[in-house]
Amino acid sequence: MMSDRKMVEQAKVYKKIAVIGLGYVGLPLALLLIGKGFRVLGIDLDQRKINALLAGSSYLTDVDKETVQAAMATGRLEPENGYSRLGEVDAIIICVPTPLTERGTPELSYLTQAAAELKPHLQKGQLVVLESSTYPGTTREVLLPMLEQSGMRAGTDFHLAYSPERVDPGNKVYSVQSIPKVISGLTAACRLQAEQLYGMVFDTVVPVSSLETAEMAKILENAYRLVNISFINELAMLSDLLGLDLWEVIEAAGTKPFGFNPFYPGPGIGGHCIPVDPSYLVWKLKQYGADSAFIALSGELNERMPRYVVEQLARLLAPRSLKETRIIVYGAAYKQDIGDYRESASIELLKWLRLAGVEAHYHDPFVPSLELEGERLYSVALNEQAIRSADAVVIATAHSEIPLALLLEHASIVYDTRNVTRGHSGKATIVRLGGGNG
Ligand SMILES: NC(=O)c1ccc[n+]([C@@H]2O[C@H](COP(=O)([O-])OP(=O)(O)OC[C@H]3O[C@@H](n4cnc5c(N)ncnc54)[C@H](O)[C@@H]3O)[C@@H](O)[C@H]2O)c1
């Protein structure tokens, strides 16, 4: 009988790869594959994204248009809004969204839609890899049966793998290529196929023993951040009570060379990964009649944070009622230097401010407009006049280009949830979340 490795040695060479879902994950991956000399069929149902790529422009803040133009100029990147040419490729990588439904349960319809569209085009010998973040069991229990409806068997006719995506948009230190890639397969042969392909693209591949291990590794990474950030957010509120500057405390604790990883407070936990992925695990646990106390508590603390910021503002602005005030939130994106505001804590903050009767506005150089409770809001100008006319400015996202001197000179109150004002002064009253002067 042929060994798994022998099977792979005899496998065909990867030349053309399809990437399904050209968002924050799929587009950088497609561009990396182009950089490595592959042909790439980039599939997305959003025609505007396809048009943008064909026109050589970018719709992601951390992918510049020159990179897209260079990729298009190779003639090897083919953006498409349909699946009909999938038969041409050697491997198919799925990077579609995995958000939550309104009930907080896994929304797998993007994945099942992609699988349904893919199925009729699946060819013998193709490798299918899921990269979307999801609960342990998804690849085996959801994707596998759908693909096998094609009449082909995974592990023999085609190969099935899971490799969690770890891209960190806006991160200038860790590129997609340099972040180690965890790889798993339905069978050992599937994993070796994926290892072979990913080994040609990424600096480091980390094979693991099962699909579920790789799926759970991604959930662990994000649940770990959720729990720790929630804990530090709780400590921020408690430090305000104790009159201690938590930021300084973290800095001091961070000098311990082992056993301590610093996490930093903020107005809540944002993004569509850290607050979302742990809920996928919770959903899976419910099938076993189990729950995660840590994840549940973190969710509660996370929801508490924007309200805490509003309470702090109410205290700072007293005796005036919040109803008589105008507040500008600086930063709508969930983290610095990107334009993604999905699940951003700033959105929750804006909601709570509006609920308290505040005339709430936002400014974000990366988010020109956003949807809030069915209403379209636009980023307001942040000039001297606008700052002066606000009763307070809340720094919710620490974009690198924040006009700190302007804010501190002209604002009446600056409530800083990101510690960017530490060591700075101005005419404004400055209060930092967790700074001990709350
Ligand atoms: N953004 C991140 O920082 C990040 C990091 C790690 C993992 N992830 C995970 O990666 C996955 C993708 O996230 P994202 O941020 O790239 O999402 P995204 O919304 O930016 O991009 C997904 C793309 O898929 C397209 N799409 C949806 N359904 C489709 C279908 N059936 N066929 C073809 N295209 C389809 C959408 O039009 C969109 O362009 C999610 O599971 C997410 O949790 C994201």
Image: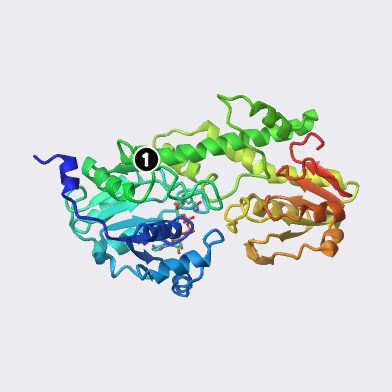
State the image coordinates of residue 213 (x, y, percent, origin top left).
Answer: 36, 37
State the image coordinates of residue 35 (x, y, percent, origin top left).
Answer: 39, 59
Q: Is residue 129 visible?
A: yes
State the image coordinates of residue 153 (x, y, percent, origin top left).
Answer: 18, 51
Residue found 32% across the figure and 60% down from its top: 38
Which kind of residue does numbered mark 1 sit on?
Answer: Ala
The image quadrant that residue 284 belongs to is: top left
Query: In the image, is 251 to the left or to the right of 97?
Result: right
Residue found 53% across the figure and 51% down from its top: 272
Answer above or below: position of 239 versus 143: above
Foreground of the two, 47 or 257 = 257
Answer above or below: position of 59 versus 286: below
* Helix, strand or loop under label 1: helix
Residue found 21% across the figure and 61% down from its top: 123
Quadrant for the C terminus in the image = top right
The image quadrant that residue 34 belongs to is: bottom left
Q: How many marks?
A: 1
Q: Label 1: which residue?
A: 214
Quadrant for the N terminus in the image = top left
Q: Quarter for ligand 1?
A: bottom left
State the image coordinates of residue 410 (x, y, percent, origin top left).
Answer: 86, 56
The image quadrant that residue 377 belongs to is: bottom right
Residue found 44% across the figure and 46% down from its top: 178
